[in-house]
Image (cartoon, helix red, strand yellow):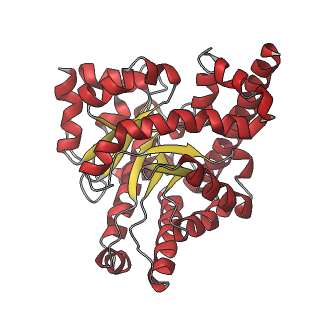
Amino acid sequence: MAIRMTGQLPRLGQSLWLDNITRELLESDTLKRYVEDLSVTGLTSNPAIFNSAISDSSLYDNDIRSQLNSKKVGEELFFDLAIHDLRRAADLFFPVYQQTSSVDGFVSLEVSPLLAHDTHATIEQALKLYAKAGKPNLFIKIPGTPEGLLAIEESIFSGVPINVTLLFSADQYKAAADAYMNGLERRLKAGLSVDVRSVASIFVSRWDVAVADKVPTELRNALGIAISRQTYKAYRDILDSDRFKCLENAGARAQRLLFASTGTKDKAASDTLYVSGLIAANTINTMPESTLLAFADHGVIESVLSRDGGDADSVLAKHVDAGIDLTALSIELQSNGADSFVKSWKEILAAIESKRRDTT
């Protein structure tokens, strides 16, 4: 049952990624089992995930202890720990990367959230981290903030694969896609290969959390899917545009749309809500471990999202009628998301420093 249900998504054109990375997943071969049995073909990480992985486990203690004489502290030490795990995961997914001609099989590492509004520093760190990891199937995650967009364009121009994170609307997605294509067009003009991969991550469930007490019962848990479906239409429009077709003819590939934050937050709703409702061709759904296992066990495939986004516009109109300012909320959610990653980042560094002190 588990293999059959999760195996349906790739047959419908959607990649299934895991939104988690821990050393335990790697060392217990659990991640390997998810690849073999549950059709997982990539993974994503973020500061909150690494915070939990490092703070709640003793598996990183020996590595922290071994660095005592190297004088590495703070972010430098964290990135050593994170890259160690992600290199192992990248190796696990490398056969997928090869079999899909580098379309799939990626893992992701985020730049420091402290740089979310510093374009120049983000560009420098993206280059440094990608070089340090030394894996072609590793995305560097850069938030799609106004400052991040310039860093995304420059990083793509430099040949760094980018996962654009913290996108919350079709407009924010389109800005990220524009930055991606700007970078590719600059490469084309410079005589460089335009085969530089990217994904654009639209966050889903946080919309529904934000409006849970502001909309009538019949609209509960409907906004995140509607925003994502509207973004899917924008995505398909860009893929069909003359601008992208010119790049595609030169060897570019789609900046694939990725549905992120797909774990259900409302206990009264289906635990596979954001999987079943967002099955769409040439996309990725990255899901928490609990959602992956739930979908494997009892997921339902009702339909595949149509190219026009289905009922997105009508559902969004109902939210506007209920008093929801979608544009303002998208900006607020992006800002809050960046702030929450900063909080997790500081907690990671504090946890590492505490473990360092405990070993001296």
Q: Image check: 345 left or right of 71? A: left
Does the rendering let one see residue 93?
yes
Residue 177 position within the rendered picture, expressed as x and y whole percent measured from the top left: 47, 65
- Point out residue 257 in the picture as x, y percentages from the top left corner: 39, 54
Specify the farthest residue to the front: 69
Q: Is residue 351 above or below residue 225?
A: above
- Quarter of the view holding residue 291: top left
Considering the image in quadrants, where does the C terminus appear? top right
Residue 67 or residue 138, whichever sits in front: 67
Please name the residue shown 59% across and 35% down the image: 82
Left/right placement of residue 189 relative to residue 53 reads left
Q: Measuring from the top left, give residue 67's x and y in whole percent.
A: 73, 29
In which quadrant will I find the N terminus? top left
Residue 189 locus on image (x, y percent): 47, 85
Above or below, comparing residue 86 to residue 112 in the picture: above
> Going by the image, does 18 lie left or right of 120?
left
Q: Is residue 222 visible?
A: no
In the displayed structure, 163 sits above or below 52; it is below
Q: Residue at x 28, y 56 (%)?
A: 101
